[in-house]
Image (tube, rainbow, N blue to C red):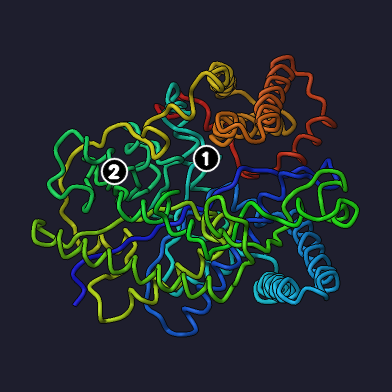
Amino acid sequence: MKTGFLGIILHAHLPYVRHPEHESFFEENWLFEAMTECYIPLIGALDRLQKDGVDYRLTLSLSPPLITMLRDDLLQTRYLKYLHKLLELAEKEIIRTRQQSDYQELAQYYLGFFQNTLDIYQNHYNCDLLTAFKKHHRAGTLELITCAATHGFLPLLNVSETAVRNQINIGVKTFEAHLGFSPTGFWLPECAYYPGVETLLAEAGINYFFVDSHGIMDATEVPRNGVYAPLDCGNGVAAFARDPESSRQVWSSQEGYPGDFDYREYYRDIGFDLDFDYIAPYILDGETRINTGIKYYRVTGKDLPKELYNPQKALEKTRQHARDFINKRQQQIDALGANMDRPPIIIAPYDAELFGHWWFEGPHWLESVLRLANENTNNVETVSCSDYLKRQTSHQIATPCASTWGDQGYSSYWINETNDWIYPFLHKAETDMEKLASDLQGLAVNPLQTRALNQAARSILLAQASDWPFIIKSGTTIDYANKRITDHLARFNYLHDCIRKNRINERYLAALEIMDNIFPDIDFRDYNPKKRHD
């Protein structure tokens, strides 16, 4: 008998990276790697579960930038080119390793992996992964939800309610335009909550969102059921909290499953290991070494020489870890049930890109978890939060506390000495945009001006992405993150001045529209604060 619920939520998001002005661009590989190692393997797992008639529920949050990139013709074409390069490299590796049978076997494994990836992408889903996700949504097994327009860090944008409202509303509208229905759930970027944002979520038709554990535990009232039941924020919008135990089992660098010695080692790739002349055609512009996705080693162990990867052994380990995960959820449910007035729901949210990209075997682990949860021998039932809210209609009313799932649990990763310079510029641009929209209320605006105004609004949204301050703090591709912020702000300021002076250069505007073609249905009038009161 099922006596408790498990809600697994994957948040799929990447920053909007699209550079038609270049023949190839390194950061576009972020998308291509995630498609190859995460999204397409996930679809493969869901297809197998459907074929076998497994009854499960999984939730997937698709961010608007990711939705847009997956549907972009240019990026779809470039991804096919990327895949064919991987196939060519794998074939070369089979020849190169002909005197090393163990390595050649792995090279053949990768060739099969890339061939299967191409088959799913091109032949099964006609280069449109959203159709795959929609298929499983229609089947009733996958709940699709969305996120803010450009993954803006909402608490730090809340200097302007209009800024937050547009991040939410444009995110929801983008989802509706591409998926064909309205989402009922919403992933707050970085799980960053501030009291009051639930009002804007309710306006957008959202029924629930997620916070980190302390968002519920430090709410305005002590939660009677801890993090194992949602809170009603007072307006019918429910806040679900992350379960720390199930998170630790997957995320922890010390005790998490992905660090097991039999799993594939992420940081050893032939793009860095092989002779430069050999690998040059498959790296960035033939000059800069990058990951190719062909990795021959397993984690092995600390301070030990890396041993060869064994895919079959790793697959067996995913089943063991899936069984361990379900067993621990059973134990939690048994312990919680005695002290709760309702069946507990364990919320297990993760970045989708962990599964396959960072943890290569992650999609297989997830598939095993969903299969095991479907068995009648355990007390765990997988549900979406929508399912749960239909079954449990009465909830404790309280307001969560300001919180994120970032380091230290609040906003310090997104505003600190490395990136705090960003926000005065963002706030000024937002203020200028709102004043522009307000000043034009009731005035005739010609088509060229409308295009410029809408492009200015796109530039603000793109500058607001939480990815850029995160990257600056983490110290990875800092120059690119700095350039993205300053470029988008410069584009906004240029357009703002042109509009004010009525000197719009249509040729330059068209170039900006080609480069930043996200949100085709955006309406600059939504930046008019007075619009809310008319």
The residue singled out by tag 1 in the image is: 151
Q: Tell me if residue 424 comes above or below residue 410 in the rendering.
A: above
Q: Which amino acid does the dot numbered 1 rest on?
A: His
- The residue located at (50%, 70%) in the rendering is 364
| Mark 1 Cα shell of 10 Å, populated few (<14), some (14-19), many (≥20) | many
The N terminus - image quarter: bottom left
- The residue located at (57%, 69%) in the rendering is 132
Does residue 175 appear in the picture of this structure?
no
Q: Secondary structure at mark 2?
A: helix
Point out residue 477 in the picture as x, y percentages from the top left corner: 67, 35
Closest to the observer: 459 or 218? 218
Point out residue 277 in the picture as x, y percentages from the top left corner: 91, 53
Q: Residue furthest right?
A: 277
- The residue located at (73%, 20%) in the rendering is 494
Does residue 58 appear in the picture of this structure?
yes
The residue singled out by tag 2 in the image is: 213
Q: Is residue 498 left or right of residue 429?
A: right
Q: Tell me if residue 147 comes above or below residue 221 in the rendering.
A: below
The C terminus - image quarter: top left
Q: Tell me if residue 126 comes above or below residue 420 in the rendering.
A: below
